[in-house]
């Protein structure tokens, strides 16, 4: 876009500065997770651990209920991902390939609520869960994460590009609509569906507000909630907290690294989801 | 392609064909109902109903454990004007949001434009910028809480080289807002670099080449070609980023004071007030009124965005 030499030099300099800003805190936390307690409290602070140790991980995984939190979060995230992949692809398919009255209007309503944050309507959601006596259960934790408006929109965009002739041909051969959904639509939209799965998983994994509200006992904590509560209670135990933070970041990084192409494509094509 | 073939079929087949078509049509209606019905029901239950119910609740003195929940009209809203905690929260949230949105988006825009002149290295940089984006808010805040620590923190160590005395970043009501802005910029900037990158790549190279031939320098190209073409995306990012920042809570929860005595200032934000009124004191009607404020704010932003896109 710009060929001038000074622009290129500025670009390198600015990007390196911002890259340091984004990466250094990240390396610091990983470094801290492997430092001994003495080294963490040393002044001046060290950047990378001098004598790497696993004792922080042993401490948080062995002497706190953190493994339970991880298992809870895994369960919730996977259930939520499954639900969202099913609901998004089904609704996306119907909106993309079938004509029915009020289709446009219903779709607009779904889109309009896409950006309204959970915080704005969590009070009635909580009352609803309270009324059916489901506070502090997995069902309550998963329940608001079973649909994703962005997912419906995204899957509709993906499925719209599948040619109608293919579906017609299948129908002539006697295929039912469910068969078409299961065998043709899911197969041909699997790349988009993966991207939605990644979004759903990371959204559920990173969720903090809803668990904070509905969970009341330690055995139902998620990693995010456990980490936040633990660091408030044992503020000075940097080592185990850093290890906990690393544990809660790693799955996100793995998922992102594995599916980077899908995610970037997802952002590029339909523009847009934090 | 299939349809003309079917019409051309001989007459005797037609009635059977008609039957088959009718059956297919029935199947389709059945499928639409079975497939979309549950999804829409779920959607109504966990999105539409709670949003409507939030508005209704805000007119009641609702307390979850009480039988009687009398209608109080606008009293909850009137109380919003008297509640000094809510005022503080609103002021803090707005100050934080303005700073965070402006700084995040300016850096992201500048970086995205600059990245286009080093096209080869761009994907690698985008990847590095994206690491904080995939980091959830809680560990992100935990990382920064430690960086801000007054005695062991890296920031104070770094500033000490420039002769700056140790600062209690999380103890001072003004500094903590700044500290929160830094965390948010860190977390969000990579996402918006990618979004702007998408917009910039859509600008045809020929336009910029033509401008170069006409003797435009880089700055003129940015001001007169790139920025005007990016306008819709900039508007979108301002709306998205403002909504994200206005809802700030997890980093506040982690970075601010706690009952267990972690040293920090107790910064109030809007969502924090909703949380404590609704789920600590169970004044759900009043929390509902605060939610409506949030809801109106988000909706007005979306309306602005919608109208602006409509003009085009």
Image (tube, rainbow, N blue to C red):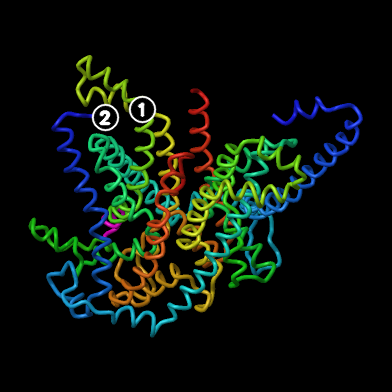
- Pointer 2: residues within 10 angstroms few (<14), some, or many (20+)? many
Q: Magenta stretch containing residue B40, yes or no?
A: no
Which stretch appears magenta?
B172-177
Q: Position of residue A146 (x, y in %)?
A: 60, 58
Do circles 1 and 2 both sit on a common chain? no
Residue A79 relative to residue B27: left or right: left
- Position of A52 relative to A80 (above/below): below
For disc 2, the marked residue is: A1
Rendering coords of residue A268 (x, y %): 43, 40
Q: Residue B152, position in %: x, y?
A: 19, 70
* Secondary structure found at label 1: loop
Percent coordinates x, y for residue B227 in the rendering? 33, 28
Question: Pointer 1 and pointer 2: residues touching (CB < 8 Å)?
Answer: yes
Compute the Cα span from label 1 to label 2: 9 Å
Chain letter for mark 2, please.
A
Q: Main secondary structure of the magenta part?
A: helix
What residue is at 36 percent from the left and 37 percent from the top?
Answer: B196
Q: Chain of mark 1?
A: B
């Amino acid at each position: 876009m710009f060929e001038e030499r000074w622009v290129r030099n500025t670009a390198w300099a600015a990007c390196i500065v911002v890259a340091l800003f984004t990466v250094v805190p990240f390396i610091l936390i990983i470094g801290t997770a492997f430092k001994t307690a003495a080294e963490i409290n040393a002044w001046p602070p060290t950047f990378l651990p001098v004598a790497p140790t696993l004792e922080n991980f042993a401490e948080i995984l062995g002497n706190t209920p953190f493994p339970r939190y991880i298992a809870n979060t895994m369960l919730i995230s996977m259930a939520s991902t499954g639900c969202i992949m099913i609901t998004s692809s089904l609704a996306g398919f119907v909106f993309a390939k079938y004509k029915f009255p009020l289709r446009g209007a219903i779709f607009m309503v779904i889109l309009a609520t896409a950006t309204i944050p959970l915080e704005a309507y969590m009070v009635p959601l909580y009352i609803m869960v309270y009324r059916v006596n489901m506070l502090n259960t997995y069902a309550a934790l998963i329940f608001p994460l079973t649909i994703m408006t962005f997912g419906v929109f995204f899957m509709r965009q993906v499925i719209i590009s599948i040619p109608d002739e293919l579906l017609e041909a299948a129908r002539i051969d006697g295929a039912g609509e469910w068969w078409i959904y299961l065998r043709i639509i899911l197969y041909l939209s699997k790349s988009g569906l993966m991207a939605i799965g990644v979004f759903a998983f990371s959204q559920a994994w990173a969720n903090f507000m809803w668990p904070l509200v509905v969970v009341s006992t330690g055995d139902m904590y998620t990693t995010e909630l456990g980490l936040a509560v633990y660091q408030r209670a044992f503020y000075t135990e940097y080592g185990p907290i850093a290890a906990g933070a690393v544990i809660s970041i790693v799955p996100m990084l793995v998922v992102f690294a594995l599916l980077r192409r899908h995610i970037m494509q997802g952002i590029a094509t339909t523009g847009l989801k934090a | 392609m299939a349809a003309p073939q079917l019409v051309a079929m001989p007459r005797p087949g037609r009635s059977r064909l008609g039957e088959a078509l009718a059956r297919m049509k029935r199947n389709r209606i059945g499928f639409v109902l079975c497939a979309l019905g549950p999804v829409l029901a779920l959607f109504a239950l966990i999105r539409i109903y709670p949003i409507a119910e939030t508005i209704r609740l805000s007119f009641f003195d609702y307390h979850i454990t009480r039988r009687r929940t009398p209608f109080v009209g606008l009293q909850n809203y009137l109380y919003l004007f008297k509640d000094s905690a809510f005022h503080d929260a609103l002021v803090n949230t707005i100050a934080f949001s303005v700073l965070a949105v402006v700084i995040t988006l300016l850096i992201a825009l500048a970086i995205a434009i600059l990245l286009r002149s080093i096209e080869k290295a761009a994907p690698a940089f985008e990847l590095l910028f994206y690491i904080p984006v995939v980091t959830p808010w809680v560990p992100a805040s935990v990382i920064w809480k430690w960086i801000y620590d007054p005695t062991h923190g890296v920031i104070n160590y770094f500033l000490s080289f420039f002769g700056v005395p140790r600062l209690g970043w999380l103890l001072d009501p003004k500094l903590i807002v700044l500290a929160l802005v830094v965390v948010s910029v860190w977390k969000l900037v990579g996402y918006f670099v990618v979004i702007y990158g998408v917009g910039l790549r859509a600008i045809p190279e020929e336009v910029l080449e033509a401008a170069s031939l006409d003797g435009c320098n880089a700055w003129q190209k940015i001001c007169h070609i790139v920025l005007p073409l990016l306008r819709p995306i900039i508007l979108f990012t301002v709306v998205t980023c403002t909504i994200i920042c206005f809802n700030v809570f997890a980093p506040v929860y982690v970075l601010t004071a706690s009952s267990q005595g972690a040293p920090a200032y107790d910064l109030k934000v809007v969502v924090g007030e909703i949380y404590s009124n609704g789920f600590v004191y169970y004044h759900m009607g009043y929390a509902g009124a605060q939610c409506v404020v949030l809801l109106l704010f988000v909706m007005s932003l979306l309306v602005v965005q919608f109208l602006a896109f409509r003009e085009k």
